[in-house]
Image (cartoon, rainbow, N blue to C red):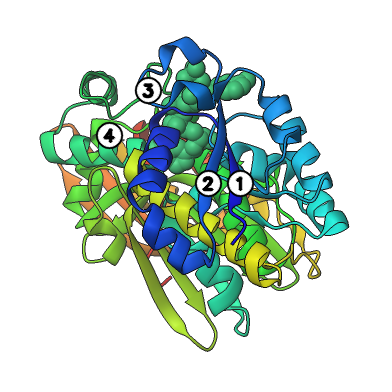
Amino acid sequence: MKPIRVALLGCGTVGTEVVRLLDEQAGDLAARVGAPVELAGIAVRRPDRHRDVPRHLLTADAAGLVASDVDVVVEVIGGIEPVRTLLLDALRAGKSVVSANKALLAESGGELFAAADESGADLYFEAAVAGAIPLLRPLRESLAGDRITRVMGIVNGTTNYILSAMDETGANYGETLEEASRLGYAEADPTADVDGYDAASKAAILASIAFHTRVTAGDVHREGISAVTSADIVAARTLGRTIKLLAICERVDDSVAVRVHPAMIPRSHPLAGVGGAFNAVFVEAEAAGQLMFYGQGAGGSPTASAVLGDLVAVARNKVHGGRGPRESAYAALEIRPIGQVETRYHLSLDVADKAGVLASVAAVFAEHDVSIAAVRQEGRTDDASLVIVTHAAPDAALRSTVDKVAGLPAVREVVSVMRVEGEES
Ligand SMILES: NC(=O)c1ccc[n+]([C@@H]2O[C@H](COP(=O)([O-])OP(=O)(O)OC[C@H]3O[C@@H](n4cnc5c(N)ncnc54)[C@H](OP(=O)(O)O)[C@@H]3O)[C@@H](O)[C@H]2O)c1
């Protein structure tokens, strides 16, 4: 049987493990695919630095490798260019593509799918969201007959590690980030993770697939975790909650709302127990009800597992005929701006301990049509704290309420403001 020839682009954390698994499992893969899967070449930036892979396979000429006699291109380089051009060239030439690149899929997914459609090639990218966890295929295929209403998850291990550690130790954000970098849980430049860009790309991909529409990273409302304070963590704990960076994709009528931000969730919520570098995604569908996907969201070997799964799928299609799912964006839903998205807020205020404070604060909420679900007031000698949790209201109304409350003479300090998720509104 003619082998399926694979071009591997990139041989770093993930690529090294792809090479290892291709070698170790060659016999099983050939049996599962129906033909041997053969590594035709590995493109890297600096071939001389890769001593653990066969020298004759290495090249610095990624474009040349893509243009050579290969059937499938596996991309684990990352970033937008030159990868976008390389993958468009591959797809236009009818070569199927497997990619782990969330940034590229979230920015140029439509363009890549169009190129795949023209030539009849496959485009798979399970590893781009939540590492090893089978998530995109269940959304694309298993739930294709259902109507998904909401996807909410923890899709970034670095921020989850930092927030879990802050919750456990009481340390502040800066100290915890430093510790995470020292232990290898955060990159030297952690911006993409801590500012929510990585999660926003993943949220865009999840929303596009779940709601059969096209969402790009720029459509996602994004807030990172650098503003989360120890006071927020304490406030959450006092109320039996914990803080997580959540990616939330919702279908609201004929629109889709996609956001990434820290939020308080009850400690009893299934996502609250997801600690350290793990990922978990909660999916709600009309007929299926609630589903939860959980596992290792990153790391060389877990991510390579997802890449290999995709490789087997596209190789089988090459051998036996047939094609994987195409882009499904027929619903063409509008993007709902964050101001119109209904959320709930938790507010913790330091206030003067005198009569009428609660009434003046409550009046601001009423003025903005924001209804209060719970209030707790604790007096001290000359000041007091007021904790308020709202019912669901448009985000814009909640923000204006917080701004106005912060300016009240009786309010000494707004100690913590955080969205609340995962409980009945
Ligand atoms: N690491 C994870 O846990 C994880 C999880 C899920 C998804 N992903 C995704 O997987 C992809 C790869 O991640 P990674 O962590 O394996 O990255 P990495 O360790 O930084 O490896 C990147 C590889 O790409 C090569 N490369 C960079 N620019 C290149 C170019 N212009 N031409 C050819 N090769 C080039 C590098 O070559 P040199 O080695 O010679 O520099 C290196 O081998 C990214 O899209 C990432 O988002 C990673």
For disc 2, the neighbor class at 10 Å (few under 14, some 14 to 19, many from 20) is: some
At a point 80% along the width and 37% down the height, the residue shown is: 89
Q: Earlier in the sequence, mark 4 or mark 2?
A: 2
Q: Which element carries disc 4, helix, strand or loop?
A: helix
Earlier residue among tags 3 and 4: 4
Disc 3 C-beta below 8 A from ligand 1: no
Picture quadrant where residue 105 is located: top right
Tell me, yes or no, whether the two marked residues, 2 and 1, touch with CB atoms within 8 Å.
yes
Give the number of the mark in front: 3 or 2. 2
Residue under pointer 3: 187
* For residue 121, side relative to residue 282 (left or right): right
Q: Which amino acid does the dot numbered 2 rest on?
A: Glu
Q: Mark 3 is on which residue type?
A: Glu
Q: Are marks 1 and 4 in contact (CB under 8 Å)?
A: no
Mark 3 to mark 1 CA distance (whole Å): 33 Å
Of residue 3 and residue 93, the one placed in the foreground of this image is: 3
Disc 4 marks which amino acid? Ile
Q: Earlier in the sequence, mark 2 or mark 1?
A: 1
Give neighbour class at mark 4: few <14, some 14-19, many 20+ (Cα, 10 Å): many
Residue bearing the label numbered 4: 162
Q: Which residue is painted at 68% across and 49% down in the image?
A: 71
Q: CA distance from mark 4 to mark 2?
A: 40 Å
Q: Find disc 1 in the rendering and name its residue.
A: 5
The residue under the point 72% across, 48% down is 109
Q: Nearer the viewer, residue 10 or 275?
A: 10
Which x, y percent locates residue 9? 58, 32
Q: Secondary structure at mark 1?
A: strand
